[in-house]
Each structure stands twice: as structure tokens, then as C-alpha cells.
Amino acid sequence: MRGSLITSEEAFLTSLDPAVEMLRRHAEEEHTIRLISHNDADGVAAGGILSQLVRRLGTNFKTTCEKRVDEKMVIAVAAEKPSIVIFSDMGSGYLDMFKEHLTESDIIVLDHHLPIKVDAPNIVHINPLLHGIDGAREISGAGVSYLFAKAMDKNNIDLSPLGIVGALADQQDKGEKKSLLGLNKLIEADAKKADLLETNVDLIFYGYETRPIARACAYTTTPFIPGLSGREDRCIAFLKEAGIDLKREGRWRALRDLSEEEKRSLFSALTKHMVYEGCDADAVHDLVGTIYTLKGEEAWTPMRDGREYASLLNACARMGRPSLGLCICLGDRNEALKEAEKTLNEYRRKIGEYLDWVREESRIEEMEEIYALRAHSDIDERIVGVVASILLSTGILKKKKPIIAWARAEEGLIKVSARATEPMAKMGLDLGEVMMKAAEVFEGRGGGHNIAAGAFLPEEDEKGFMELVDRLVGEQFRD
């Protein structure tokens, strides 16, 4: 088994060679490189890696982060007449569109989502799934982009922390004690070799070594702690009641300053609190795991902790400001960082409001095989997937069913976000396949991973779509 895994990884790494050759040729001819990345946190990290790579090649480039691939966007890119376009963390499900509209450009697709099969002489398609590697757990979009950058030049090993951030943003810490797996371990080893990363196991509050404990608790949203996440005043009261000293010798204490006994008391208090709030008792165990400390980042900043960095990029993306995240990935630690921190605070506040809205009334409908959340315009389409993930991870939904949430997007479309758990995937559930099949029936597009997927389709087809998804999920569970 181990031998076949090594073969798959080697085959994937070798598959990067044609893409390296293609980019190098365009860089030598001093062509402007067009970079297009997904506008989630993983995509922003991937876009940051590729922007750094191309900048180091000494050629001009243009980077944008896009919400989705559609015909309108692809035609607009074709109108720019780029010599080469690189898609990162998106594109594998849209190769047919690229083949039709981007005939005059060379194309590199660096993705880890469910692919379709299309052959075209101008397209180099890089995807770990084509080599039997799990794109939902073993490598992120940023990870694929990092390995591509390293294949171009081994000195790009200093970009490995962004590969780690992308994996954490995509919640690929599925190993023992919330550690990374597969090719992500290779990236982790690179970061440690470059002395840019250290790891240890502890409570994974955001800002483990950089934030006062109450703020770290309030800033923790994965897992979401009902009544505490986003509410620093309540966290202060909660910690005092748990017997935790917030200050010592006039200095605010961070989580790293607590004794083992204090950490045990805190863990016990959190368990009781989450059960009281209606969460599954096991949800609190998601608060213990591997800490990824980025040693190249300044202490007491949001980029020092890998998950906090991922959270910052995620907030920028979800609040419609991915360019802020890109600036941070490119090294801006001044104005862009200040703006990003404000954006992160606003993002946390919004999530809290949306979760209150969901829980105030019976907003979630239980269907035969799924939970359905019809958010209409009450939840921002960029954040509806985050809300679905939180509802699933906290154990508030008592039956072992995936949740399918949708919110209105532009141009009469809805954005659908589907979320499931690892045990559901082991039972045969593949939401990426479900979204792809169901969306096609209603002239939409869908795809993703087995436990996290999405789709766009016309709003008038929502009822039929949800009924079809319910049926397809049931068929997968029964197979």
C-alpha cells in the first residue's frame, strides 16, 4: 500500500513538468502572465503563491480572484487576449469552457476539485485526483500551486507556509490530533526544513500565542462556540467563572501562558458550556489539535498562527475583499493588514448574526436524507457555506444527514453550499458528485469535494433541485 502511495505522489509531481515548461517559455518571451484564482481563502493563498512566483520570474502579471467560473467570465478573459492563463484552485470542472473560448491562449489549470475529461493541445491540467490522491484531505489548491512553484525553482521553498495556510483554510487537518495528511506533510516538511514552521499539540484557540485569552476565545470560529465566538465580553465573564486569571503581573495572558491545570479547567468548562448550548459533547474535542506556528511571521500578529492567517484570508474573501488577502500574501504588513483585521472583525460579527437568525426560529427543514437551509437574501451567498459548516460541526443538527444551504446570488441565480462529515463520506456520500449531477439537470454547474461542495443554478429551479439532491444522497447512502 505504501509503495502505491509513493508512486501516486511521484506521478503527480512529475505531472507538473509540462506546466513548468509552458510557464518558463512564456516568461522567457516576456509575456504578461494572467493569473485567475478562486476567491476563497485557499484560492487567495494559491493566488499569492503564483503571484510571488511570477514576480520572481521577472515578468509582468495580472492576478484576480473570482467567485466562480462561468461563460461570461471566460469570454471576458479571452477578450484580454492573454498569451497564457493560469487558473488556480478552480477550473477542473470547466475545461470544456476553456477549450471553447480560450483557443488563442495557453492554459494551465492547477486544481484539486472534481475534474471533467477534456483534451486540448493548449491546456495543461494538473490535478491530484487524476493520480488517485485525495484533493479534499491530502492537498489544497494552495498546496498544488506551491508544489508547482517549487518545481519551477527550489528556492521557492520559502512559499511553503502559504501552502500550509491553504490546507488549514480548506480544513484539511483531518489527521490524528488535527494534523495534515498526504502531500500536505511534504509541504509541512519543507516549511520546517526552511525553519519557517513549528508544530505542537494544544487547545487551538485563534491566536494561541498572540492574543489575550478572552479575545482568542471570542475569535475562535472553527469550531464555533455558541454564545462565545465573536463576543469578547461574554468570554471575559466565562473565563472568570472558570477561574482563569486573565492578567498576571499587569500583562494580558495568552493561551500559551496557562498551566496544564488551568487548561484542563478551561476544557471542562467549555464542554459544559457547549452541551448546554445544544452542541454535541464531542464537538469540544475539535478545540484540541496541532498548532501550526509560522516562525517567519512577527509574534502578536494574526499571521503567526496558521489557522489565524487562514481565518484572515477567509474573512477578506467572504467579505468581497480578496485583493486585501492577496496583498498580505505578497508581503504587505502595513495598511492592508490593518484593513484585513477590521474586515475580520466585521466578518465574525456577521457570522454571529447569521447564526442567531438561523437559531431564532425553525429555519432548517429536515427532509428525508438532508437538512435544508433556505437563506434567500437573509444570509450573504459568500458566507452561507460557512454557516452551514458551523451548524454541522457543532452537533446542533442531531441526525447524521448532510446540510444543503442556499442563498440568492446575482442575475437570478442561487449559490448552493453542501456540507457533510467524514463518517458520512465513509458511508459512500460524495457531495461533489451530487452537486455536479443535480446542477446539470437544471442548467447549472456544480462540483467540489465529497464533504464540501457547491453549485450555482437559476432560483426558480430551487425546489426541484433540492428534491433531486435529497434523492441522490439517499441513493448514495443505500449503494
Image: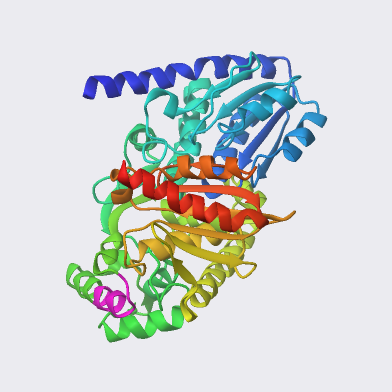
Left or right: where 339 falls relative to 101: left
Q: Name the residue nearer the viewer: 402 or 223.
A: 402
Which of the 4 image quarters holds residue 441? top right
Which of the 4 image quarters holds residue 72? top right
Residue sitting at x 53%, y 44%: 438
Quadrant in which the N terminus is drawn: top left
- Asked if residue 128 lies in the magenta stretch, the reply is no
Quadrant in which the C terminus is drawn: top left
Q: Name the residue nearer the viewer: 35 or 356.
A: 356
In the rendered image, residue 460, in percent from the top left (x then y), is placed at 67, 57
Q: Main secondary structure of the magenta part?
A: helix
Q: Compared with residue 435, is residue 278 higher up or lower down, i.e. above or below? A: below
In the rendered image, residue 47, in percent from the top left (x then y), is placed at 59, 39
Residue sitting at x 36%, y 19%: 10
In the rendered image, residue 38, in percent from the top left (x then y), is placed at 60, 42
Q: How is the image coloured?
A: rainbow
In the rendered image, residue 178, in percent from the top left (x then y), is placed at 29, 50
Tag count: 0
Q: Compared with residue 24, is residue 292 higher up or lower down, i.e. above or below? A: below
Which of the 4 image quarters holds residue 336? bottom right
* Residue 168 visible in rendering: no
Residue sitting at x 32%, y 64%: 399
- Asked if residue 277 lies in the magenta stretch, the reply is yes
Q: Farthest right residue?
A: 79
Left or right: where 255 falls relative to 29: left
* Residue 443 visible in rendering: yes
Residue range in magenta is: 269-279
